[in-house]
Structure formats: structure tokens, C-alpha cells
């Protein structure tokens, strides 16, 4: 019998598993052979590591040969890890408590199992103990899911939950440290999931190194005859303590109204669930003329603000607080005021869904101590994710206090037969 009783706070300094490469970047190529860990993307100079140190369980696979061309441009999509066993399987990522991060998972099934299944695979993602998103993926879908959060411990679990609708899998798990001033609405009690990040007026897909945080800025080159695409070669200077740090390349393009139009309308038809809470950030830079450009900003027909752009200055507008949408769509209207000399224009937008951190979790010092024990003694079994929550996924041998608080203490630990040799 190997039993440990925790009196007060039992703290051990866990040895974090760090990756070579960019400072603040951890890019895990799931299913990558350990011998190839440390490979570098030749275009973006991003270093990929294998996933062995960060996950227990699962199986390594390669996508089908006839779908390799579908993964062209991103070698990390050619391999994946699937989880046919266990209800919850987690990647445990090293973090700094109180620091802000972006985490992104990429998915491409690629018929890795050779079943040619026309049906979708569906499973849930959890950020720590909190529900993040439901993934619904077909064989040829290339999809990613991204979240911004503040770390609550020295380790943060990102978990794939088997809901009985197919085997969960993932191709890459990516973690990037963000500046403390970015996305100030994200805190220890509220994370958010990216739903859209659009770069207007261009067909260029922007990410690292143009964006030092490697956010994906997808393209929206206007097909609307009522719009016109704008661009400049002039560098757009970033402001100190900018809350969004929109890359210069994104701010160098925009859309505006064509001809003598005075109203610019952007409709995001996404079929969002009315129960979900969203936040919308609109990003502007007027790089055309130093004349008055003033417009009213409406989101779903509700006036948010009357706004004036300053020549060559970066600015952003957001809806006040988290809000929902009745019909599942977002309608953004920029209407020039009577005194405006120029029509409205917009460079980019970001749309996020709230991930409320409402589920209880293990006290951070206890969690860090358990991770130290896990790595010290090579304990695996079901030791992944949060040690205490949700209760049906609690770690074997771990006894937690019956607390009504949102953080729970570990009061005892039994290591009998829990160590994999």
C-alpha cells in the first residue's frame, strides 16, 4: 500500500516539458514519430514536437495516401492521434498561472482508419473542466478550434470527450502565450472560443510570422458589387498596450462602399445557437484620406456607437458585454453620418463565444503537486485532465474534499497499483 495523505498544501515543483522553438510557442504534432520531434516548418520556421510527453493513451495514425494532397501546405495534418478508449483523454499543457494564452486544435480525419465512413464523427472539447465546443467532422473536413484563456495553474488540460458518436482524434495542439494587455475581457473566470476572424479586402491568409501570436486571419475578398476593396502599402503603426494587436498586414486592407454608397453591411450567417453568448470586435484603420470619416455602428440593428476614424490610426469597437442573437446571425451595419465626408470602411473583425468558467476544479497548488507526482512516478491509468472534476472522470486513487466552493482540495492519495512500469 502506497498512500499519501495531503495535510494543507502539498507542493512539488513539477518539471515542465518544454519545446524547442519560438519563445512562448508550443506546437504539438499529434502522432508524429518521436524521432522526428523538433522538425521545423520551412516556410514559417515553426518548430513541431511529438505529443508523447503531453498525453497518455491514444493511438498514432497517418491519413490515407489518397488524401495526402488535401493536407498539402501543412505536414502536421498528415498524422494524428485517435482515442478509441476512455471517455476523457487530455493533453496537459505547461503554463504559467495567471498568464494569458491562445490554444488551437487542428483536425483532419483523412480516412486514417480506412473505413471510408460517410457519416460525421462528433465529440466534445473541454478547456480544463469547462465545456468548450462540440466538433462535428467528416472525413475530408479541415477544421480548427481555438480559445483564449487565463491559466489557473502550472498545467492546463485540453480534453477530448467521447460522447458516443465516433472516436475523438486531433492532428495538432498549439499553445501560444499572449500579451497581458490583449483581450482584456478574458480573465480567470471567463475564457472565449474563436468563431470568426476575418481580414477584409484581400485574398491573403495571414498568420505567423505576420501575426506574432499566430492567429488565423481568414480572407474575405468582397464579391458584393456594393462594396469596394481597398489597400495600402504604407506601414500601419501599432499602439502601445493595444488590446488586440491586429497585424499591420491585416490593417493594410479594408472594404468600403462602392460609388456614392453611404451604408456598409456585413452579414455573418452562422446559425449560432440563441443560447450562446458572443462578443464582436470590429477593427479599423483609415489609410485613405485625412478627411472626416464618421459612421454609426449597428450590430443586429442595435446602435452601438457613433464613431469617427483618425487618419492612419488603429481603432476598435466592440459590443458592450456578452450578448446573444435571436436568429443565429450577426448583422453589422456601418452607416455614414450626415456630416461625414467619406463612406464607412472596415479592415477586420473578430467574433468570440463565451466559455464561462463555471465548473468546479481542483485547487491549483494541489493540481500542480499531482502533476509532479504523475511525472515523478510515471503514473498513467486515467490520470489526465483535472484530478477531481468532473466527478465521473476523477483520477483513480485521488480523494477530494466535498467542497461547495468552485475549487476543491485533494485530501488523500492512494498510489497502490497505479504506477505503470
Image: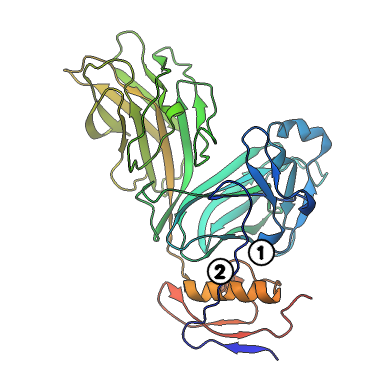
Q: Quadrant of the N terminus?
A: bottom right
Q: Which residue is mark 1?
A: 87
| 40 in relation to 256, above or below | below
Residue at 69% x, 77% y: name it.
Answer: 377
Q: Position of residue 220 (x, y in %)?
A: 49, 24
- Disc 2/disc 1 C-alpha distance (Å): 14 Å
Residue at 55% x, 28% y: name it.
Answer: 205
Q: Quadrant of the C terminus?
A: bottom right
Image quadrant of residue 141? top right
Horizontal relation, residue 290 to residue 322: left or right: left
Q: Position of residue 332 (x, y in %)?
A: 35, 30
| Residue sitting farthest toward the top | 259
Camera-nearest label, 2 or 1: 2
Q: Residues within 10 Å of mark 1 (few under 14, many from 20)?
A: some
| Residue sitting farthest toward the bottom | 1
Q: What is the secondary structure assignment of the residue under circle 2?
A: loop
**How many marks on residues?**
2
Q: Which residue is mark 2?
A: 386
Q: Residues within 10 Å of mark 2 (few under 14, many from 20)?
A: many
| 275 in relation to 298, above or below | below
Horizontal relation, residue 273 to residue 256: left or right: right
- Sequence-earlier tag: 2 or 1: 1
Residue at 63% x, 44% y: name it.
Answer: 106
| 375 in relation to 27, above or below | below
Q: Nearer the viewer, residue 332 or 57?
A: 57
Q: Nearer the viewer, residue 306 or 154?
A: 154
Question: What's the image's color scheme?
Answer: rainbow
- The answer to whether residue 76 of the structure is visible from this angle is yes
Q: What is the secondary structure assignment of the residue under circle 1?
A: loop
Amino acid at each position: 500500500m502506497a498512500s499519501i495523505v495531503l495535510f494543507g498544501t502539498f507542493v512539488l515543483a513539477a518539471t515542465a516539458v518544454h519545446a524547442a522553438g519560438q519563445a512562448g510557442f508550443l506546437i504539438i504534432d499529434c502522432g508524429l514519430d518521436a524521432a522526428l520531434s523538433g522538425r521545423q516548418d520551412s516556410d514559417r520556421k515553426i518548430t513541431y514536437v511529438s505529443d508523447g510527453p503531453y498525453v497518455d493513451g491514444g493511438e498514432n495514425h497517418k491519413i490515407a495516401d489518397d488524401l495526402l494532397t488535401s493536407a498539402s501546405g501543412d505536414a502536421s495534418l498528415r498524422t494524428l492521434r485517435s482515442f478509441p478508449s476512455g471517455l476523457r483523454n487530455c493533453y496537459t499543457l505547461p503554463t504559467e498561472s495567471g498568464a494569458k494564452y491562445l490554444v488551437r486544435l487542428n483536425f483532419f480525419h483523412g480516412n486514417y482508419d480506412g473505413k471510408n465512413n460517410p457519416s460525421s464523427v462528433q465529440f466534445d472539447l473541454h478547456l480544463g473542466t469547462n465545456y468548450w465546443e462540440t466538433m462535428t467532422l467528416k472525413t475530408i473536413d479541415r477544421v480548427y478550434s481555438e480559445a483564449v484563456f487565463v491559466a489557473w495553474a502550472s498545467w492546463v488540460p485540453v480534453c477530448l470527450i467521447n460522447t458516443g458518436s465516433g472516436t475523438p482524434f486531433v492532428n495538432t495542439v498549439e499553445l501560444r502565450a499572449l500579451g497581458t494587455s490583449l483581450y482584456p475581457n478574458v480573465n480567470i473566470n471567463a475564457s472565449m472560443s474563436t468563431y470568426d476572424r476575418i481580414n477584409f479586402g484581400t485574398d491573403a491568409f495571414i498568420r505567423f510570422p505576420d501575426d506574432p501570436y499566430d492567429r488565423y486571419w481568414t480572407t474575405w475578398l468582397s464579391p458584393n458589387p456594393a462594396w469596394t476593396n481597398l489597400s495600402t502599402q504604407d506601414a500601419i503603426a501599432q499602439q502601445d498596450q493595444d488590446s488586440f494587436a491586429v497585424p499591420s498586414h491585416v490593417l493594410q486592407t479594408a472594404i468600403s462602399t462602392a460609388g456614392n454608397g453611404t451604408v456598409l453591411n456585413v452579414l455573418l450567417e452562422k446559425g449560432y445557437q440563441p443560447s450562446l453568448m458572443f462578443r464582436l470586435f470590429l477593427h479599423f484603420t483609415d489609410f485613405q484620406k485625412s478627411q472626416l470619416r464618421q459612421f454609426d455602428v449597428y450590430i443586429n440593428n442595435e446602435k452601438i456607437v457613433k464613431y469617427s476614424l483618425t487618419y492612419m490610426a488603429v481603432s476598435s469597437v466592440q459590443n458592450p458585454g456578452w450578448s446573444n442573437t435571436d436568429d443565429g446571425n450577426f448583422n453589422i451595419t456601418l452607416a455614414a453620418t450626415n456630416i461625414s465626408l467619406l463612406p464607412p470602411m472596415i479592415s477586420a473583425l473578430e467574433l468570440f463565444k463565451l466559455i464561462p468558467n463555471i465548473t468546479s476544479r481542483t485547487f491549483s497548488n494541489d493540481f500542480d503537486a499531482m502533476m509532479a507526482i504523475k511525472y515523478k512516478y510515471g503514473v498513467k491509468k486515467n490520470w489526465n485532465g483535472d484530478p477531481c472534476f468532473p466527478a465521473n472522470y476523477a483520477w483513480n486513487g485521488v480523494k477530494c474534499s466535498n467542497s461547495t466552493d468552485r475549487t476543491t482540495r485533494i485530501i488523500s492519495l492512494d498510489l497502490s497499483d497505479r504506477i505503470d512500469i
